[in-house]
Image (tube, rainbow, N blue to C red):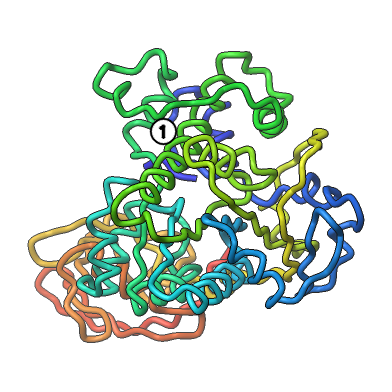
Amino acid sequence: MIRHASLFVASLLLTLSGTGCVIHPPAVSNQASSKSPYRPLDTLKDGTILHLPTGIEVTKEQMFNLLSGARVVYVGETHTNLNHHRVQLEILKGLLERFPGQVAVGMEMFQRPSQKQLDRWSRGELDEKAFMEVWLSNWDQSYNYYRDMLRYIRDKKIPLIALNAPDDLVRSVMQKGTEGLPESLKKELPEMDRTDPYHRSSLEAVFGGHAHGKEGFERFYQTMLIWDETMAQTVAGYLSGSEGKTKKMVVFAGGFHVNYGFGLPRRVFRRLPEPYAVVMPHTAEIPENRRELMMDIQPVSIPLYLADFVWAVGYEDLEDQIVHLGVQIEGTEKGVGVRKVMPNSTASKIGIREGDIIVSFDEKSITKPFDLTYLMSLKQAGDRAALQILRGDQTINLEAKFESDRKIQ
């Protein structure tokens, strides 16, 4: 599946035709930190909200008063920073309190073919286990980063809109470019504006310095355009349609899609010229052991405001909590078969072997791979689990105590 661009860039640079995971550019703080005409953003204390065009600090109430006039509010994120998602949820709650029943949410993380399942979630018709299966078919970051937000959307019955392009279209553009698409896929292409010099120069900086030529960059650029233009088309289409014509929308997307307004905001405005605002959570310091999140990008000069508001927050992730059993699995008639056991994993330490069949986990039956995936997602470092496995004619009971993946590595 193609999702989210450090891995995308690496994949494309290596093969120019790969179909590995795709990551939208993570926090690009060396660009964002200086883009304030009055105050360096990295000097802001956590909790500060800065109105960027004036350099004046505002309260949350003042910010919400200003956001209330917008039809679309874009809130950026670094995908693995919990504090960014807390800002997003606080903005959603604040707007819903002011406009009950008149707010929808659009999310980059879901592809448009998933819309019927998102509708069921918003109506409370889908349980969380089934919804997590939808999540994992769309996005590769841990559901737990978004859990509170998604539960709030369900509990308040807020319309949740899948914004992004389907995998088959994106994969084909990566491999063939837009000109090489079959006619069936060309019909799915949104109207694309290729003329924005700032959008292009920023993407050249992301791609930059690699000896893979013009063709490689053009496919990368076209892929990013597909994402931005498809999401913009979806936002504008919903807000212009019968269901959304009386609503506002809060859009959650990676920072690159909303920073400077040349990604989503400008492309939505081309289709639906109504007031909008951009809020960007900003984190000045990334812990040393998470610096791999940062892309080494040479700043480019962009004479645009980074956002309307910057909200300074610290960094917090889930990496110390995330655990895995450490097995490759497949479905079988009797349960979930173990194809491979990873060295130094929890599974190897408790004696799970290749060929074993996992039939229960904490006394819950395991009949398909997602059963195990879901139950493992509920575990954190320090938790225990009781497993029952079949090994030939034997039934074996095991107990696991989970350590964080970071500690195991």
Q: Position of residue 198 (x, y in %)?
A: 71, 30
Element under disc 1: loop
Which residue appears at 13% of the width and 59% of the height? 332
Q: Note whether residue 77 is visible.
A: yes
Residue that appears at 57% across and 22% down: 194
Q: Is residue 140 above or below residue 171?
A: below
Q: Is residue 214 above or below residue 269?
A: above
Q: Is residue 407 visible?
A: no
Q: Answer left or right for 275 relative to 3.
A: right
Residue under the image location 9 percent in, 66 percent down: 334
Instruction: Report the amino acid beneath label 1.
Output: Thr
The one of 337 and 269 positioned closer to us in this rendering: 269
Along the viewing direction, whichever of 401 and 283 lies nearer the viewer: 283
Circle 1 residue? 19
Left or right of residue 111: residue 70:
right
Q: Which quarter of the rendered picture does the N terminus lie within?
A: top left
Image position of 227 (left or right of 76): left
Relative to 127, residue 268 above or below? above
Badge 1 density bin: few <14, some 14–19, many ≥20, Cα 10 Å: some
- Judge by depth and name the residue closer to the eye, 253 or 288: 253
Quarter residue 345 falls in: bottom left
Give the quadrant of residue 133.
Answer: bottom left
Q: Quadrant of the C terminus?
A: bottom right
Residue 272's spot in the image, x, y percent?
48, 41
Identify which residue is drawn at 59% across, 70% down.
82
- Report x, y in % for residue 254: 57, 51
Asked whether 75 or 3 is in front, the reply is 75
Residue 52 % position (x, y): 80, 56
Q: Quadrant of residue 197?
A: top right
